[in-house]
Amino acid sequence: MSTEILAKPLTGRVAVVTGASSGIGEAAAEHLAGLGARVAVLARRADRLGELVSRIERNGGTALAVAVDVTDAAAVRSAAGRVAAELGDADLLFNNAGVMLPAPIEELATDQWQRQIDLNITGLMNVIGAFTPQLVRAAGERGVADMINTSSIAAQNIFPNFAVYSGTKAYVTHLSRHLRAELGARNVRVSALEPGIVGTELQSHVTDEGALAWLAGSKETMEWLTPRDIAETVGFIATLPPRVNLQQVTIMPTGQPS
């Protein structure tokens, strides 16, 4: 086996990363490119995607920026077509786009409820619908493909005022289990990642004072995970032997009790 293959085990693979303009998605795109994958980075902020592609290319990688809102099904289908045309069929899909907007249910923040449902569930389904045919084709040609979905520890544990967000992430985890059963026979592995607290822009979207106080307190008492921690986990999953599927991976800060 050549040194190049050992150093870059994803050489020849095509990765798609959503929510790639910051945080976990940005770190994952850079890490997967460093492992040899050709990477398509999807998000709304074209300027941030352009900067990310430039960094990947400066480091010897290959990347394609596709500015797209994942809640727009037609735009996502168009993006999938562009990825196939310019890089080839995707065989690694990292569904990472999402938003967290906790608030007491009695506040009736219905616009925030809908935003979380639209992005965390509908956006996820738009991407899965657009790219699953590519994953299946690529698995047939290359032996394996991966769909890795970002869920949250909130899918399993109870956090007051996080009901809607937690519900959307429980959907992600349960959907992933079903898709693994459905697609495994086609050599498409499906994994749900359930991180605890990760330091990203996600916290900057929070407006609820109680949630902000809880987050600030937690940051003082423990070291949060970093986007790089999650990115390296994505790379680990994707480089496992084709016979191995990690169905569900919980990644917690050492100091976070639940």
Image (spheres, grey):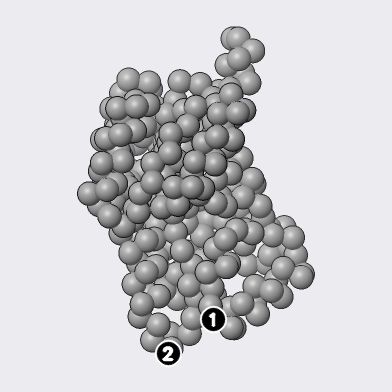
Q: Position of residue 88 (x, y in %)?
A: 34, 25
Q: Secondary structure at mark 2?
A: helix
Seen in the picture, residue 130 relative to 72 is either above or below; the reply is: above
**Residue mark closest to the camera, 2 vs 1:** 1
The amino acid sitting under disc 1 is Asp
Report, in whole angstroms, how far the alpha carbon at label 2 lies from the one at label 1. 12 Å
Q: Is residue 243 visible?
A: no
Q: Secondary structure at mark 1?
A: loop
Q: Residues within 10 Å of mark 2 (few under 14, many from 20)?
A: few
- Left or right: 138 with respect to 149? left
Residue at left offset 39%, top offset 67%: 116
- Left or right: 244 with respect to 250? left
Indicate which disc, 2 or 1, sits on the residue closer to the N terminus. Answer: 2
- Left or right: 74 with respect to 193? left
Q: Is residue 46 visible?
A: yes
The amino acid sitting under disc 2 is Glu
Q: Which residue is mark 1?
A: 208
Q: Which residue is mark 2?
A: 106
Q: Position of residue 256 (x, y in %)?
A: 68, 64
Q: Residues within 10 Å of mark 1 (few under 14, many from 20)?
A: some
Seen in the picture, residue 130 relative to 85 is either above or below; the reply is: below
The quadrant holding residue 181 is top left
The single residue placed furthest to the bottom in the displayed view is 106
- Left or right: 75 with respect to 109? left
The quadrant holding residue 224 is bottom right
Q: Position of residue 62 (x, y in %)?
A: 49, 27
Q: Tag count in the figure?
A: 2
The single residue placed furthest to the right in the displayed view is 221
